[in-house]
Amino acid sequence: MPKSPTKPKYVLIIHGGAVQTDPATIPPEKEAALKAGLEEALQAGWEILSRGGTALDAVEAAVMTMEDNELFNAGRGGMFNLNGEVETESSIMDGLTLRGGAVSGLKLVKNPVHLARLVMEKCKHTFLTAEGAQEFALAQGLMLQDPSYFKTEEQRREWLDIILEADKKHANAHDTVGAVALDQHGNLATATSTGGIEGKLRGRVGDSCIYGGGSYANNEVCAASCTGDGEIIMLGALAHEVYALRKYKGLRIDKAAREAVTMYADKLQGDRGIIAVDPEGNIAIESNTNVFRRAYRVNEDEPFVDIWMDKE
C-alpha cells in the first residue's frame, strides 16, 4: 500500500517581550494571564497555517492579537512616553518577495502591524511615520482611535512610577511583541510591534520597525524577530546578524541566534531576545534575560508556552 504524502512542515513562534526582572514583579495571577494571552495569539496564527494559509497572514494575526491585549506593550498596552502619550511602531516582512512595510510614531492606530502590512502592499514607500502614516491609514479606510483607547490604568501607574523613581526596573519593560512563521508553501515571514521603552522621549524610534534591527525575513535563510533594549538591537543589527551568521558562517539557526544574543555584549549592554525559524522549520528561542514571554507550535504538535528562561 503506497504511503500517504507527508504534510509540509509549518511553524509559528511568537514572543511578548524579554526583560531581566525580579520574579516578584510577576505574581502567579499575572503569569497565568500572560500565558493565556500568548496562547490566544499563538492559536490565531497557527489556525491560519494549519489550513494552508500564508506565513504573512499568520504573523499578522498573531501580532494583532497581542496588540489588542493590554498586557503586552504593543497597540493598546503601549508604554507611555515621558509626556504621557502612547507612540507605537511596527514592521512586517515577507521572506518570499523581500518586501516589507514599517510604521512608527503612531498615536491613533489600533493595530500598527496591520498598517505596516498595508504600507507593504499599497504604498510606493516601505516606511511611513507619524502624521503621514496616520493619513495613509485614513486613506486606506482604517478608523483611528481616540488616544484614551491606548492608555490603560496599569501603564499609567508604570508611567507615574517612572517619573517618581527614574531608576526603577519594571516588569512590563521591553514587552515588544513579535512572530515568525514558516507556512506549508515553504515561505517565511516576520512581524514585530511595540509601544517602545517606558518613559521614552517623544519621537523616539525603536528597533521593531527597523529591517535588520528588530525584524528580518528571507526565504533562503531565516525569519527573525527581536525584543529587548531597542537601541542596542538597532546598533547591533541583531535580526540581520542571525541571518548573516546562518548564511555566511553556516551556523544552525539556534546557534546563530545564540551567538547574536552575545555579540558585542561588551559594547552594547542590555536585554536581548530573539525568536527565529529557518526554511526547514528548525527554531531558535534565545535571550540573555530571565523573562522571555514566548510560545511556539510545530505542525499538529502540542503548543509550548512559557515566560521564564531560568526555570527550564
Image (tube, helix red, strand yellow):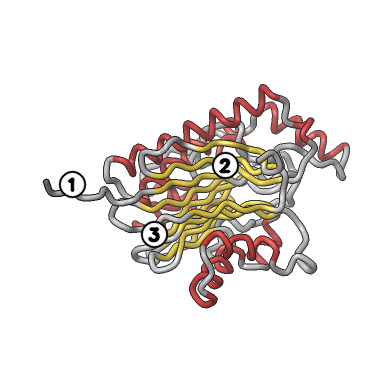
The residue labelled by disc 1 is: 4
Mark 3 residue crowding within 10 angstroms, few (<14) / some (14–19) / many (20+): some
The image shows residue 289, relative to residue 221, as above or below, that is: above
Q: Residue at point 51% right, 44% down?
A: 14
- SS under mark 3: loop
Q: Residue at point 59% right, 36% down?
A: 306
Task: For residue 81, say whether it is visible.
Answer: no
The image shows residue 36, relative to residue 110, as above or below, that is: above
Quadrant of residue 37 in the image?
A: top right
The image shows residue 182, relative to residue 221, as above or below, that is: above
Quadrant of residue 35 in the image?
A: top right
Side of 74 relative to 300 (left or right): right
Numbered circle sitting on residue 181: none
Side of 123 relative to 159 (left or right): left
The percent coordinates of residue 54 (x first, y second) are 32, 50
Closer to the eye: label 3 or 1: 1
The residue labelled by disc 3 is: 280
Foreground: 1 or 198?
Answer: 1
The residue labelled by disc 2 is: 294
